[in-house]
Amino acid sequence: MKFFADTADTADIRDLADAGLLDGVTTNPSLIHKAGRDFLEVVAEICAIVPGKPVSAEVVALDYEGMMREAEVVRRIADNIAVKVPLTIDGLKTCKALTDDGTMVNVTLCFSANQALLAAKAGATFVSPFVGRHDDNGFDGMALISDIRLIYDNYDFATEILVASVRHPIHVLEAARIGADVMTAPPSVIRQLVKHPLTDKGIEGFLADWAKTGQKIG
């Protein structure tokens, strides 16, 4: 499963990329606002940190013509841009036009398997079902991922399932068990994956025993 970082914080992105943990990055208007930087500038910097790996940048227009105008600006930022559009009829029209022209497209705000089916038919590179928000509203976010996986496998759709709104490591584990193609999570969640009390305890014991030897390395 590919790991994307869901952030516009370039320091976090660089740190995770240096560890070999990133296959891409997702951003959205809320993350850009949190970063407090110019949209085009920060997206260009992110693209340079992860060259050749998809970086999702979202349009904010809601009509087809407006989305296409904004997409033209966004996709000129770098070759690894995936234009992010909402799962609406106009978003799907934009998706079809952009993918036909060779541009990667991430169809976002997916909350049903039927919506995911439409995104695949429109040629989406990625579809982003929001599991955390789904859970928040009394639904089973991971059941949604299972349904989408089944449907995509039934018809051999090329669209990649990008599990979004990931809140904790269990979401990551369950997405991997189901066979999602990608998960995108805040850097804090990605870093939680490395944590285990027995790992910490093992390090503590090894260091204590090493100190007793009185030796140094180098």
Image (cartoon, rainbow, N blue to C red):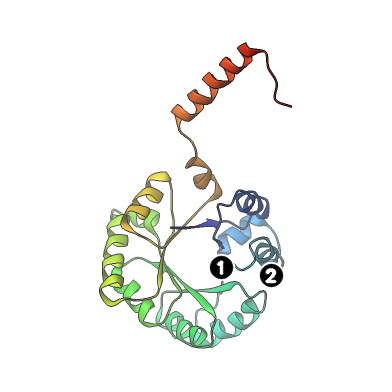
Percent of width and height locating residue 123: 42, 81
Amino acid on which the number 1 mark rests in the picture: Pro
Q: Pointer 1: residues within 10 angstroms few (<14), some, or many (20+)?
A: many
Q: Quadrant of the C terminus?
A: top right
Instruction: Determine whether 15 is above or below 105 in the image.
Output: above
Q: Which quarter of the picture shows residue 181? A: bottom left
Q: In which quarter of the image is the N terminus?
A: bottom left
Closer mark to the observer between disc 1 and disc 2: 1
Left or right side of 115 for 186: right
Percent of width and height locating residue 168: 43, 45
Q: Residue 40 carries which label?
A: 2
Instruction: Determine whether 26 is above or below 94 in the image.
Output: above
Percent of width and height locating residue 80: 60, 72
Q: Mark 1 points at which residue?
A: 54
Mark 1 → mark 2, Cα distance in angstroms: 16 Å
Q: Which residue is drawn at 34% across and 51% down?
A: 174
Mark 1 secondary-structure assignment? loop
Q: Which residue is drawn at 54% across and 57% down?
A: 6
Amino acid on which the number 2 mark rests in the picture: Leu
Q: Pointer 2: residues within 10 angstroms few (<14), some, or many (20+)?
A: some
In-front residue for pair 107/196: 196
